[in-house]
Amino acid sequence: MDILIWVGLGLVAGVLGKLIVRGKDPGGCVVTILLGIAGALLAGFVGRLAGIYGPDERAGWIAATLGAATILIVYNILRRR
């Protein structure tokens, strides 16, 4: 069930991450939302590994948005190569 919540959080985090990381993405909104979902999942998994989140806690909005922004930055760097 946590993964579904992370996905929902990732939808919003992807949009917020896109507002933070400017640039033209070839996939448009769909790719941005998918990268946002991946960012939210990344933030949740890393937070659990670091002990920030317990088993029943989800990543917060800030962590998910930072995760989405991080993945968008990496995506833009890899896309330029």
Image (cartoon, rainbow, N blue to C red):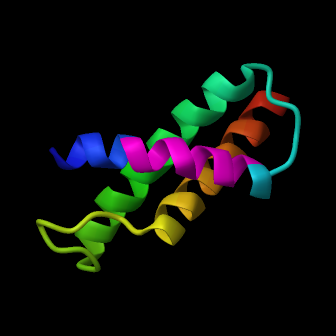
Query: For this view, does 79 lie left or right of residue 12?
Result: right
Q: Position of residue 42 (x, y in %)?
A: 41, 52
Left or right of 61 in this view: 73: right
Query: 27 or 61: nearer the eye?
Result: 61
Q: In the image, what residue occupies the spot 73% across and 47% down?
A: 18
Q: Measuring from the top left, give residue 75's x and y in whole percent.
A: 68, 38
Q: Can I make out residue 81 in this image?
A: no
Residue 15 painted magenta: yes
Q: Nearer the viewer, residue 54 or 79?
A: 54
User: Is residue 77 located in the magenta-colored stretch of the structure?
Assistant: no
Q: Position of residue 32 (x, y in %)?
A: 65, 34
Viewed as shown, does residue 3 lie left or right of 17?
Answer: left
Quadrant of the snapshot with the C terminus:
top right
On-image quarter of the N terminus: top left
Q: Quadrant of residue 27?
A: top right
Front-lying residue, 73 or 24: 24
What residue occupies the far left of the structure in this picture?
Answer: 55
Q: Position of residue 33 (x, y in %)?
A: 58, 34
For the point 35% across and 65% down, the residue is 59
Q: Over which residues does the magenta segment extend?
A: 8-18
Q: How many marks?
A: 0
